[in-house]
Amino acid sequence: MTVMMEVPDGDFDRYRQQFPRMRKQVKCRLVKIKDEQGNIQVLYTSLLNPVKYKLTAIAVKQDIYAKAMMMTLCAALAFPIEERVIKEYQADQEKGLVKHPHKINRTFAYWSTKGI
């Protein structure tokens, strides 16, 4: 089953500042499976094509772990750059050269990390 998830207004406004390309609605797929004990589980994934991506609990876990690993790698690579940007901003702020805080574009950083 494919569903559209909508980010609540307050959260959307807050996250949109950090992630400018974020969409208000996200398309996802819900899949119902039975685990080894016979319990029914509903899994959520961004892998939308049911023919190409036959879902099992392992496939969904791999999808989640892969995204978590990419986000962690991105954060690790971006950390020294972000620290440098903060220091440069503070130095420029003391000189009166800037009005608004500077920060890295995390959406672009994540996108760039995918190419590694």
Image (cartoon, helix red, strand yellow):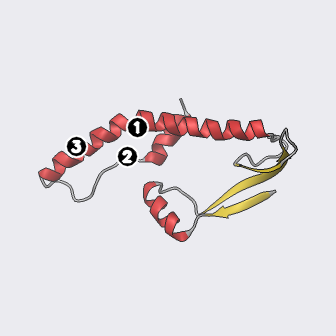
Give whichever of discs 1 and 2 has the lower sequence position: 1
Question: x%, y% of residue 33?
Answer: 84, 47
> As shown in the figure, which amino acid type bears the numbered disc 3?
Glu
SS label for mark 2: loop
Instruction: Please report the residue visible at 62 percent of the width from the left and 36 percent of the height from the top.
Output: 66
| Mark drawn on residue 105 | none
Residue 56's place in the image compared with 94, above or below, is: above
Q: CA distance from mark 3 to mark 2?
A: 12 Å
Look at label 2 and name its amino acid: Ile
Q: CA distance from mark 1 to mark 2?
A: 8 Å
Quarter of the image that includes the N terminus: bottom right
With 101 as the anchor, is 71 left or right in this view? right
**Residue of label 1:** 78
Give the camera-side residue of 96 and 46: 46
Front residue of 38/17: it is: 38
Which residue position is annotated with label 2? 104
SS at mark 1 in the image: helix
Q: Are marks 1 and 2 in contact (CB under 8 Å)?
A: yes
Question: What x and y, as percent, mark residue 38?
Answer: 88, 44
Dot 3 or dot 1: first in sequence order is 1
For this orientation, the residue located farthest to the bottom is 9
Q: Amino acid at mark 1?
A: Ala
Q: Which residue appears at 20% of the width and 48% of the height?
A: 90
Q: How many marks?
A: 3
Picture coordinates of residue 17 (x, y %)? Answer: 43, 60
Q: Nearer the viewer, residue 94 or 61?
A: 61
Q: Position of residue 41 (x, y in %)?
A: 80, 49
The residue to which callout 3 is attached is 88
